[in-house]
Image: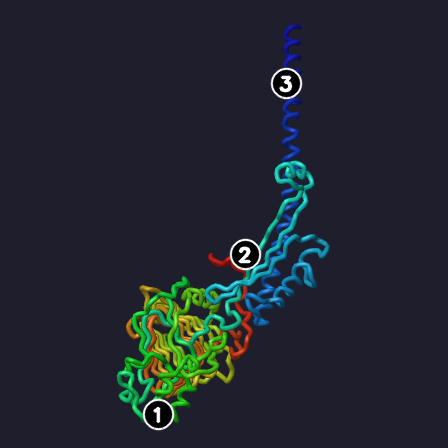
Amino acid sequence: MYQYMQLLTKKWRQQGAIIAFTALLLPMLIVGTGLAVDLGHVYVHYSRLQNAADAAALAGAHEYAVQGEKVNNHPKADKMAEQYVQGEYHNLDRSESIVEKKYQAKTKDNITYYRVKLTKEVPLYFLGGIYKKIEGKETFTVPVDSVAVVPAQAGGGFFNNMFIFKEKFDAVNSLENPDKLSNNSYSTDSKNMITTTFDGRIVYTKGDGVNNPGYKYESLSYSTQTPNLDRFFTSAAKEKNANNNINTLMEGTDEDKAKFDGKGTLKSGYWSKAEYYNYNFQTFYDYMEKKTAQTENKATDQTVKTSSNLFDSDIIRVPKTNSIPNLTIEVDKNLGNNDNPVYIYVEAGMGVININLNTDTGRPLIICIAGSDTQRPQVHFNLNGHTFKGVVYAPYCDKGEGVLVNAENSTFMGTIVGTSISLRGNRSHYVYKDYIGGGGSSGSGGTAGTEGITLITPPEGINWD
């Protein structure tokens, strides 16, 4: 009997412990359940808010590009973004209270970033009282933001300069009879001396995207036969020089300087000088790498001709293989009379790259030659009396001769980027034109291309305020 009573007492004590344990655990279970419910509720609102911001950022960036808006004035982009938040194409109910909507555009290294920021207060149903004691409110603040990139921004896209160099630039035979200019003294018959004209900007850069106006290039010569020449001349100067001594141009005032619009196109003026420009070489590489990464249209031979089937596509990639140690791009067929670009990405590791024109390109060729400090190809560019439209992008070309351009009696329209740039031949005409910022149009308009707009994590250093 005694043993039975002991067993019964023990059982009662265990039951009492379970009740006490349950009473102790119950508040924790309630808080845990409330936390799970409220966190789930917050996450649902966060997901909906983020989806709305993503859609709005893409739509706003697209409208920004199409309308050619500016970073400090983009009402049409903002209106379109709003349509994807709580407007015509809304992702959120129009009755929902969004405490903050912010639409911003910023530019860094010639790339525009369009940002949508949304903030909402989400009510807490189970833990509101507890949260109020901690934060003084019964709602949880949910902020989201989304950023879309517009690679080819209005007002110049990737390039708003004609020549961009890092270390050296020189031009040969830009003047005829250079002996008429000696120690800044001018012959009285110094007319028709200007043979090569430059209707675009020549700039030098550090190339890493870090603003460094004090950066110094190794050398710059506007005419190797006239060392004292400190400027290059436009086509307007050539026309004036036909009837006037060149001293009227050499001794001109600031009023005679070449003037450019916001896209780098010459507006007026007779002469200009090189100036510093903050540019990041890697930006365009990243764009071209992504643009051509998925293409199956790849060269298999070290000679690529415009008459080949490769040019049935607008995107061509040239891989570095044992069968392609060097490369020749031969323009043997005019590609048509429009300004829709053909993009050619040449992988790093080539030894020598020749670009030879046997006829006009017709369509612009955007030739991007990859490289690095340790992989520097030689780039030989021969226009042979024809017209080239497009871009030759080789910022890591050979340091010595750089991008070597033979343009006797030829016309170049577009941009050249190189560690060094050497121009050869007289009676040449160089003119800036943007074939990418126009999204495949003439590039002379004010709108940017919409190709390449995508969500992105923006680079560091952008102050969104």
Using the numbered discs, state the Cα–Cα distance from disc 1 to disc 2 in whole angstroms. 56 Å
Q: Position of residue 336 (x, y in %)?
A: 49, 84
Q: Position of residue 421 (x, y in %)?
A: 34, 75
Residue type at mark 3 is Gln
Q: Residue at x 37, y 79 (%)?
A: 355
Task: Determine whether, in the image, residue 92 is placed left or right of residue 270.
Answer: right
Residue 465: image tag: 2
Q: Nearer the viewer, mark 1 or mark 3?
A: 1
Residue type at mark 1 is Lys
Q: Residue at x 30, y 90 (%)?
A: 187
| Residue position for label 3 | 14
**Coloring scheme used:** rainbow
Taking 285 as reference, is 33 above or below it? above
- Viewer-proximal residue, 378 or 16? 378
Task: Determine whether, in the image, residue 447 is placed left or right of residue 130.
Answer: left
Taking 460 as reference, is 442 above or below it? below
Do we see residue 349 in this rendering? yes
Do we see residue 325 in this rendering? no
In the rendered view of the protein, which quadrant contains the C terminus?
bottom right
Using the numbered discs, state the Cα–Cα distance from disc 1 to disc 3 in whole angstroms. 114 Å
- Viewer-proximal residue, 236 or 378? 236
Mark 2 or mark 3, earlier in chain: 3
Mark 1 or mark 3, earlier in chain: 3
| Residue position for label 1 | 191
Q: Position of residue 137 (x, y in %)?
A: 66, 41
Mark 1 or mark 2, earlier in chain: 1
Residue 24: image tag: none
Q: Residues within 10 Å of mark 1 (few under 14, many from 20)?
A: some
